Image (cartoon, rainbow, N blue to C red):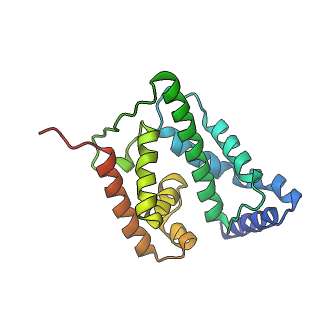
Amino acid sequence: MADKSADLTDTLTSHAAGDTRAASRLLPAVYDELRSIAGRFMARERKDHTLQPTALVHEAYLRLVGDKDPGWNGRGHFFAAAAQSMRQILVDQARRKGRQRHGGGLRRVTSGSAIAIESPVHDMLALDEALGRLERSDPRAARVVLLRYFAGLTAKETAAVLGVSVSTVEREWRFARALLHAQLVPPAAG
């Protein structure tokens, strides 16, 4: 795994430096992990969603490699950028569909679980709004959510990407989940 991660980091560095051959090595090296990230995103979408995980991977990949200087600093940064790109694609699609079908109206997400971030999210726009508020108030906590929840990184990998301790990541993760839960799940009627 360490060799694979080092090879990927070398390929990302070469791509960022303008090596055109690196781009042809990049997709095969990251495809399975990108597909996993896309699968996690799509598992939280409506069952009738028209975008398939493969299409999401391809669109996100095209956005990622289209940047002249993506600024990737290794595997973690690349997958965080991929998760952010997928999130934006799904938000853009949700906005388009909302305008077309429902006049852009938003609905609150409901969940029977104690922490909504761990359950399926059926309203990408509500989640995006909540993450936007979190990004404005606590950018690092929002990055932790992006890396842990969307990119699927472990606490240790997230700590390495952010340059903080694992305990800091775990604390930010607990805080962010509680905050997002409070914003996404309406209080129980009593």
Quadrant of the image occupied by residue 168: bottom left
Relative to 134, residue 95 above or below? above
Question: Is residue 161 in view?
Answer: yes
Q: Nearer the viewer, residue 138 or 31?
A: 138
Residue 105: x %, y % from top left: 41, 30
Q: Which residue is located at x 67 percent, y 46 percent?
A: 60
Q: Which residue is located at x 67 percent, y 69 percent?
A: 73
Q: Which residue is located at x 38 percent, y 49 percent?
A: 118
Quadrant of the image occupied by residue 170: bottom left
Question: Is residue 115 in view?
Answer: no
Residue 175: x %, y % from top left: 34, 63
Residue 71: x %, y % from top left: 70, 65
For this view, does 188 lie left or right of residue 130? left
Q: Residue furthest top?
A: 101
Residue 62: x %, y % from top left: 73, 46
For this view, does 56 lie left or right of residue 121? right
Q: Nearer the viewer, residue 37 or 121?
A: 121
Report the quarter where the N terminus lies. Answer: bottom right
Report the quarter where the C terminus lies. Answer: top left
Relative to 121, residue 11 above or below? below
Q: Which residue is located at x 52 percent, y 56 percent?
A: 152
For this view, does 184 lie left or right of residue 169? left
Q: Nearer the viewer, residue 161 or 104?
A: 104
